[in-house]
Amino acid sequence: MFSKTGHHLLNIFFPISSWHWDFGDGNTATTNNGASHQYANHGLYDVEMIVGNNLGCTDTAYRTVLVDTLPVANFSYEIPCEGLQTCFFDESISNADTLAGWVWNFGDGSSSVLQNPCHIYSDTGSYIISLTVTNTDGCTSLPEIDTIYVSSSPDTDFDYSNACLGDTTYFVNLTDTMGYSIDTWFWDFGDPGSGVNNTSGLENPYHLFTTPAQFPVKLVAVNEYGCADSLVHIITVDSIPEAGFEITDTVAVGVEVEITDLSIGHGSVIISRYWDFGDGTNATNINPIVHTYDNPGDYTICLTVEDVNGCTNTFCDTIIISGLPFAYFKFASDTTFETFFYDFSTPGYAIVDWFWDFGDLTVTTDTISGVQNPIYFYPEEGYYNACLWITDKFGGTDDTCITIYAGNAVIADFTETGHCLGDTTWFYDNSYSPVSAGFESWYWDFGDGSQIYYSEPIDTIPHYYAGPGTYHVKLGLSANVFG
């Protein structure tokens, strides 16, 4: 039997001519210069190698081999968006001990050996990602490969109409989609008091804010590849100003209407006042606020106010524009030159003031104000130019002048019968005009508080006195002196 040295000598002088491998899993091989074998299962295997020469001498070597399971590479990643950091997350399985190495290829010429790297793609497009991992036993996984698409994120922006309390605010979406479809719009109006109405998925939504305040309104846009962008605008919701004014109910044509502005800003300054007077005319920011109407009728005046935040409010009220009054009077005179003036201006219910000028050029005191039916004593018989100015309760005015005749242009005369209590007293008109004036009106005062007026001739006038006594009866006439 040879010693180890002898064996070596044998190997030198008698070359090895046979090899036998037993891999410990039931498989063998007779290859020389080493052998390779793939185990179907992991575990510990006793490997035996027997060599022999031409003399039949053999030798055996034993080794225990640990066959490890390959690690399995796997990963996940955030949504990749151009210009933004995309992080990758290792989810590999070591299958023995722990992982010791990672090799990432990001598909754009960049790589990393970190376990969970992040990477920024500078261009859009498709990229092939691969990950290979190695465990502490030196086993290396097959590469895990995935294709990702990098898209541009949308550039969110929006505008909105005036944000006024009580008014609906409309939002206009100005987002640049970068050529990609948007899968999701999400709005948060920052108004928790509005409950379920505080958010919206519409592209161009609207919202009614619940209180005057500042609200952080947020828009989030997510495209078809999941890339998102968001923007927040601070929106100031202002209290709506309160328009208001005060006017007289009725004013006459041509009378200046004075309007008292009662508008309230409610915290914000009113910067604009627009007046619509209802007659086709308007004005902005006038002071004082006055207007004159040319025609009678009902007119609706509207005031629209706007504050510094663009919030508006409108108030309207109706004014009645009455026609001008019509001045007219009649007169009656007697031989004493006592002349009676009778106001017949219209409309009688609206007239509140009268001013008379009796046309007596001999004095300066031939005027009287505030008396509807005055009496004037002229100094002598003759013609006079008497004038009347009237004013109604709506400010309307009118005037007229009439040439009258003081004296016996018309002679009032009458007789009567029946002076017994309980009987009818009959009055007979015997009046006449020495200048052939045409009679226009008759006025009787029966001395007991009763009066009558008529404008057509009546020769016989009946009257009934309720009690005995002496009554001073007066007949007044008016006539057209000029026929």
Image (cartoon, rainbow, N blue to C red):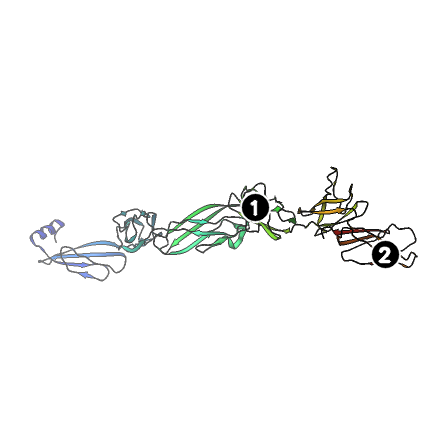
Instruction: For residue 280, say whether it is visible.
Output: yes
The three-letter code of the residue at mark 1 reads Pro
Sequence-earlier tag: 1 or 2: 1
- Residue 163: x and y, percent? 51, 48
Relative placement, left or right, of 67 versus 428 is: left
Q: Identify the element where label 1 is drawn.
A: loop
Relative depth, front residue between 6 and 196: 196
Viewer-closest of 419 and 79? 419
Q: Nearer the viewer, residue 40 or 324?
A: 324
Name the residue tied to disc 1.
241
Where residue 17 appears, x then y in whole percent?
A: 10, 58
- x and y, in percent, of residue 335 in the image: 81, 46
Q: Say which amino acid is labelled 2.
A: Phe
Q: Nearer the viewer, residue 297 or 3?
A: 297
Q: Which mark is residue 380?
A: none
* Disc 2 packing (10 Å; few <14; some 14–19; many ≥20): some
Residue receiving disc 2: 427
